[in-house]
């Protein structure tokens, strides 16, 4: 391993290492980031939720959006899987159904970036207990 | 590189390791590989989460799920349910003792809500055996900044302005200590980290060293730069094998990166650290004894002055600070003196780590702002007294401190308030006692410790404490007199006034403080020959109520010393001269005929 010879070396090294613990630091303060929950019950997984989750993780990072993506159990909308819940900081969560990679891309571009609602919203019939 | 969607943090502190956290990690790794998730979920060994009561702890991020008392057998379920399908495993979640509900994430646990973690900032968050994770958390940035931007005098000024006081017990201002050491010119100076944590029930320093060793190394280098020292020594007790292992790893990694050694970060400043093991004598927590022990001499204190800052290790100017003090330093440099000074009370700034022990629900390690009340610590963070019993007292400052009682519950805890209350901050051990604890026995317990640990150099401590112990023993045996109570107090005051070092000067504190707060218990032992808490065996008597006894002979048959006699179907009698007060008869009696008087 190269030696750290100056403060700038250390700073560069920190930046390259940051991503290793980013996930943990964001978890410490989830409220200030975009929070996305992907329903990952059997129904969700069978309909491709895992691909969508990976897609979103990659794309959000590529597009420089600070976000916390977690997986959750069945939300009860098995007819519309894969489903995801998106909560923008300070806003009520919104659930989207039938999310494939294309839809996910649209959600990121329109809703997450600009707050514009897109097709496929499922009216929520539950409340999250904090 | 694989991108992880989840991190599983498994506590690798001594407590959780003792409960098989190693095999939990192994199990996670093999289960994840079997499920094809090893590239998606990362398993990390961390330092102590502080919630030792319910260890081993497993925390899942980013959703902050906090699993308690996880066994290796539970791992498969966590992987299959939570990590694959997103369903938290309810039965392993923390249960709030008040509402009896499962708490799904650590953000909602009373234990963490009131805490501010400065010294413990990385404990339970990073892998202590990986310097990269420390660097990712701004590690070594403070020493880099200091070397590049500040002179030693400016750095000392920051520490002075922050109001940081020594966390080892005395509460001496750290900045001032550094300044004194910096002004004494010498060809060689030393920075010593005092990791000789010896209070019964205290484990703050161990946890910091196990969970975040680099923060101590970094702070020692900062101190070295300030006072003009190029050598650092960590004096650590050999009973802390895990902390020693992790420190060794940390020192090796820091040297490899050039963060210890010659010309650190191109500044021309050299600093390196070695370890020195102590044999675990309590008195070696005292600076001068510690230095003698490091030199290979007997661990005995000497008079101050000369202070170590003038003539310490090998006769050279030496600055000794405690682990927790050092661990707070890098954050102060990074976030500024004003930030640190904004936390805490007027004269005690920042936070303090406490090790909660005794009859408290959440035994563990906490860090709270100075000025937090005892009530908040015990009842909100600590979750209250075990088994719903009544709070009686809390001992702070270990064998050198005193007890705080109900009337002190709302006193803000800081250095000066604790002294005013007849106790002291000490290094942060807090032993909680309930209504079943006999305060005379508690004083005796601590005296027993001091007698054992006295180095024997000066007479007041060596002989005086032994006599104190003997008087306490007579009192708990029911042989005490009123004159002896008076002698107990007088002797205590003499020991305080005439002992050489801090150990002797503070050793009678548990006696004085329990006498001040629980004098009625002493009187009950002396005058009535009774122990109100029912702890002192010599003062108890087992008696059979003749009206309730049916003569079933169950007690007589189970008495190990044949102290119970009586005919069948007639009331039995206990011969108190033979009875050893083991309690076997009470357990066997189905008619509640036996009581303790």
Image (tube, rainbow, N blue to C red):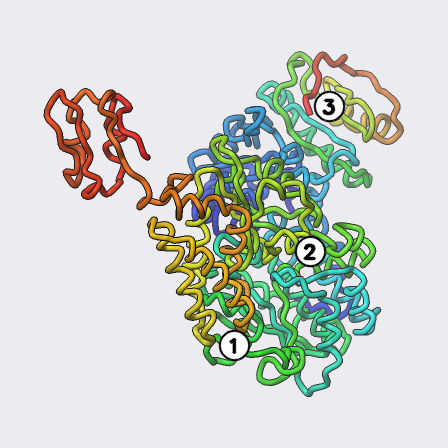
- Placement of B591 over or under B363, stated as above or below: above
Q: Chain of mark 1?
A: B
Q: Secondary structure at mark 3?
A: strand
Residue B396 or residue A87, whichever sits in front: B396
Residue at horizontal 14%, vertical 38%?
Answer: B562
In the rendered image, which quarter is residue B501 located in? Answer: bottom right
- Point out the tag, 1 or 2, that comes first from the N-terminus: 1
Whether marks 3 and 1 lie on the same chain: no
Residue B67 percent coordinates (x, y): 54, 35
Label number found at residue B592 = none
| Side of B393 relative to B114 (left or right) | left
State the residue position of label 3. A85
Residue B46 or residue A97, whichever sits in front: B46
State the residue position of label 1. B294
Whether marks 1 and 2 lie on the same chain: yes
Report the Cα–Cα distance between label 3 and label 1. Answer: 60 Å
Report the Cα–Cα distance between label 2 and label 3. Answer: 51 Å
Residue B348 or residue B444, whichever sits in front: B444
Give the quarter of the figure containing the C terminus of chain B: top left
State the residue position of label 2. B416
Closest to the camera, between mark 1 and mark 2, is 2
Residue B502 percent coordinates (x, y): 56, 68
Residue B11 percent coordinates (x, y): 53, 46
């Amino acid at each position: 391993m190269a030696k750290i010879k100056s403060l700038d070396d250390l700073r560069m090294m920190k930046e390259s290492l940051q991503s290793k613990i980013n996930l943990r630091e964001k978890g410490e303060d989830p409220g200030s980031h975009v929070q996305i929950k992907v329903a990952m019950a059997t129904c969700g997984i069978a309909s491709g939720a895992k691909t969508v989750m990976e897609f979103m993780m990659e794309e959000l990072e590529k597009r420089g959006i600070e976000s916390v993506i977690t997986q959750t159990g069945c939300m009860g909308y098995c007819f519309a899987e894969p489903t995801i819940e998106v909560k923008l900081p300070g806003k009520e969560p919104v659930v989207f159904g039938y999310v494939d990679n294309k839809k996910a891309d649209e959600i990121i571009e329109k809703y997450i970036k600009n707050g514009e609602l897109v097709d496929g919203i499922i009216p929520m019939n539950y409340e999250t207990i904090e | 590189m694989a991108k992880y969607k989840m991190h599983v943090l498994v506590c690798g502190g001594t407590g959780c390791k003792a409960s098989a956290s190693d095999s939990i990690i192994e199990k996670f790794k093999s289960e994840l590989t079997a499920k094809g998730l090893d590239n998606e979920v990362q398993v990390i060994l961390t330092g102590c989460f502080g919630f030792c009561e319910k260890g081993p702890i497993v925390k899942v991020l980013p959703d902050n799920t906090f699993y308690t008392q996880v066994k290796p057998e539970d791992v498969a379920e966590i992987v299959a349910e939570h990590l694959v399908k997103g369903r938290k495993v309810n039965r392993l979640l923390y249960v709030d003792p008040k509402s009896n509900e499962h708490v799904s994430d650590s953000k909602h646990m009373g234990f963490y809500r009131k805490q501010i973690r400065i010294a413990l900032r990385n404990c339970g968050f990073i892998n202590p055996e990986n310097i990269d994770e420390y660097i990712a958390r701004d590690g070594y940035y403070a020493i880099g900044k200091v070397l590049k931007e500040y002179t030693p005098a400016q750095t000392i000024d920051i520490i002075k302005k922050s109001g940081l006081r020594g966390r080892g017990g005395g509460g001496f201002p750290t900045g001032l200590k550094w300044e004194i050491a910096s002004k004494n010119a010498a060809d060689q100076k030393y920075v010593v980290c005092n990791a000789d944590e010896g209070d019964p029930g205290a484990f703050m320093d161990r946890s910091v060293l196990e969970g975040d060793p680099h923060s101590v190394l970094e702070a020692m280098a900062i101190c070295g730069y300030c006072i003009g020292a190029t050598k650092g020594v960590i004096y650590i007790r050999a009973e802390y094998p895990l902390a020693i292992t992790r420190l060794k790893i940390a020192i090796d990694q820091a040297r490899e990166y050039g963060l210890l050694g010659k010309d650190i970060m191109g500044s021309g400043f050299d600093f390196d650290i070695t370890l020195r093991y102590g044999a675990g004598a309590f008195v070696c927590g005292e600076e001068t004894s510690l230095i003698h022990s490091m030199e290979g001499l007997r661990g005995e204190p000497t008079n101050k002055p000369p202070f170590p800052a003038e003539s310490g290790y090998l006769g050279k100017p030496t600055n000794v600070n405690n682990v927790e003090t050092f661990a707070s330093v890098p954050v102060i440099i990074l976030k500024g003196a004003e930030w640190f000074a904004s936390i805490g009370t007027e004269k005690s700034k920042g936070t303090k780590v406490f090790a909660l022990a005794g009859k408290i629900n959440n035994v563990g390690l906490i860090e709270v702002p100075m000025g937090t009340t005892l009530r908040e610590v015990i009842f909100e963070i600590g979750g209250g007294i075990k088994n719903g019993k009544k709070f009686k007292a809390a001992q702070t400052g270990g064998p050198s401190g005193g007890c705080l009682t109900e009337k002190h519950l709302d006193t803000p805890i800081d250095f000066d308030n604790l002294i005013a209350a007849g106790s002291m901050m000490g290094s942060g051990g807090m032993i909680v006692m309930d209504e079943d604890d006999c305060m005379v026995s508690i004083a005796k317990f601590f005296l027993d410790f001091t007698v054992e640990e006295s180095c024997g150099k000066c007479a007041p401590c060596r002989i005086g404490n032994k006599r104190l112990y003997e008087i306490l023993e007579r009192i708990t045996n029911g042989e005490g007199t009123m004159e002896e109570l008076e002698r107990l107090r007088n002797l205590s005051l003499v020991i305080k006034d005439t002992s050489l070092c801090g150990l002797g000067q503070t050793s009678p504190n548990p006696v004085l403080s329990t006498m001040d707060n629980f004098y009625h218990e002493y009187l009950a032992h002396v005058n009535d020959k009774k122990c109100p808490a029912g702890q002192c065996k010599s003062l108890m008597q087992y008696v059979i109520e003749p009206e309730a006894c049916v003569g079933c002979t169950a007690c007589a048959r189970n008495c190990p010393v044949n102290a119970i006699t009586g005919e069948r179907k007639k009331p039995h009698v206990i011969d108190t001269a033979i009875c050893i007060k083991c309690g076997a008869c009470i357990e066997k009696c189905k008619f509640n005929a036996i009581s303790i008087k």
